[in-house]
Amino acid sequence: MTDPQIVLTERVQQALARAFGPEHADADPLIRPSQFADFQANVAMSLAKRLRRAPREVAQEIADQLSDFPGTVEVSGPGFLNITLSDAWVTEQAKEMLADRRAGVGAATPPQRVVIDYSAPNAAKEMHVGHLRTTIVGDAMARVFEHLGNTVVRQNHLGDWGTPFGMLIEHLLDIGEETAVAQLEAGQGTEYYQAARVKFDSSESFKLRSRVRVTTLQSGDPETMRLWHVFMDATIRYFDKVYSMLGVTLTDDDIAGESMYNPMLAKTCDDLAAMGVATLSEGALCLFPPGFTGSDDKPLPLIVRKSDGGYGYASTDMAAIRYRVDDLKADRILYVVGADQALHFRMVFAAARQAGWLPDTVSAEHVQIGMMLGKDGRRFKTRSGESVKLTDLLQEAVDRAAAAIAERGYDDETKAEIAHAVGMGAVKYADLSISHDSEYVFDFDRMLAFSGNTGPYMQYATARIRSIFRKGGVDPADAHGPIVLGVPAERALALHLLGFGAVVEQVATLVEPHRLCAFLFETASLFSTFYEECPVLRDDVDADTRTSRLALCALTLRVLETGLDLLGVPVPDRM
């Protein structure tokens, strides 16, 4: 089974080579869906300028070289190629796709080791909405890469080390371990931090104790390390509750926080200095990767050791990138982090290449995450101006979903299951359906709507197909066809479905999960038209037509279920 646009690209490129010479074989045929045919190729318009010939003349020569094409090719307008595939070809490809358990999704060749750094909450404070997008986008990409046969190494780069932990551990001693653990497990990390901070700012004795505790923490004092583990274990249990609620695939085994890299930092700096890549500047050890200058036109430093001997984000990130290349054997590293860190990561990548720690054979990419905004267009916060707690936000999504289905006659257990799936699906799909680097307006009313490009609409479309099979007493796995495309709505749906595999591969290549959302929404829209125009179970439908349409329903269901699973969007059996 082959994606139509890939087939057309290859055929048109072959025609270009035959018509105008092999030097044109790699030209982009510029094939796009068309309202006048299945597809339109616009390559003749651009090629005509290079050949100094009329576009229609160039287009006709290309068309003449497509004589063995499975369909029709017509020259239109100033030089467009209108391409319509034959019904027989579309039918045959749909049959092959139906027989393929992976619904046309191939495997990466060769498979890669892909390291994905995502979520990364700060253990000193509570998870808030700012962590939602990186967690959702990163997890979707992990699912996509694994589905394509790659080895994915998830890295949850927790903020679990540094000077604030001195006062956090001292506060734990003041209130008692049991009280501290209960507070942290309940997701009250922000309140915990604020209480410690108030004491740090108002009490000289507490401040002194906190600073001494930082020293004992950094020296690895056993009792201090035990207290740090008490704090971290309780905090991680809360993080796990959030991950479980969201249905993301991160586990405790994926934690690779700042504390993990702490023992590597001195050697990282020493090695950079020894090779002459890092130099002292005003007492600080800095790298000056080429191409980065400040507002004063002076080279911009990446500080890996401060003048007081302390380390910062750049130190940890340089150690991490070295570890991910040398120890994790990464072929590709994705940092799913806020867009405001763009300059920092460009400098880290450049410095790592300068040091020889990031070879040309390894790709490092910053997957920029845009800011989440409220309906007022400002940073999403509570009315009092604080960051919204992530658990509160997710619970509100579930509660609103429960209210939306309250009158549908389900028992309490079923209603709770559906409400959770719809609430989480709405939040995740709304995020994934827009470009990850765009600013994103968080709007419950829009994301929980049962119409438009939303999670609930996609879930409903999938559940509706399942209901067809329940009513017909047929298992979707037993709907083998044969498929016969008798009316336009059937053909349009089948033709679209053939593009699924290519879209999944494109999502991995470009790291753009919104492309999969767009494809699935178009799938659901085309199925809705098919459902209205092509009765499946009605008494006046003959057996062959019923068999064919059930097969097309089964193929659509597999594409929607697979695609939504790759996005991490759950689909309830009933809506």
Image: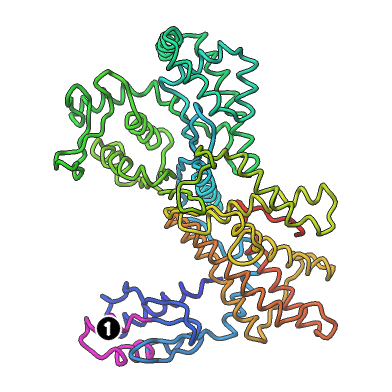
Disc 1 residue type (three-letter): Phe
Start and end of the magenta stretch? 42-64
At x 41%, y 38%, the residue is 329
- Asked if residue 504 lies left or right of residue 526, the reply is left
Q: For this rendering, which residue is in front, 212 or 304?
A: 212
Residue 355 sits above or below residue 570 on the image: above
Q: Position of residue 129 (x, y in %)?
A: 53, 42
Q: Residues within 10 Å of mark 1 (few under 14, many from 20)?
A: some
Residue 537 belongs to magenta span: no
Q: Secondary structure at mark 1?
A: helix
Q: For this rendering, which residue is in front, 99 or 264?
A: 264
Q: Position of residue 276 (x, y in %)?
A: 18, 29
Q: For this rendering, which residue is in front, 70 or 185?
A: 185
At x 65%, y 73%, the residue is 527
- Asked if residue 541 lies left or right of residue 378, the reply is right
Q: Residue furthest front?
A: 384
Q: Position of residue 450 (x, y in %)?
A: 66, 63
Most common secondary structure along the magenta stretch: helix
Judging by the rendered image, the residue that carries numbered circle 1 is 20
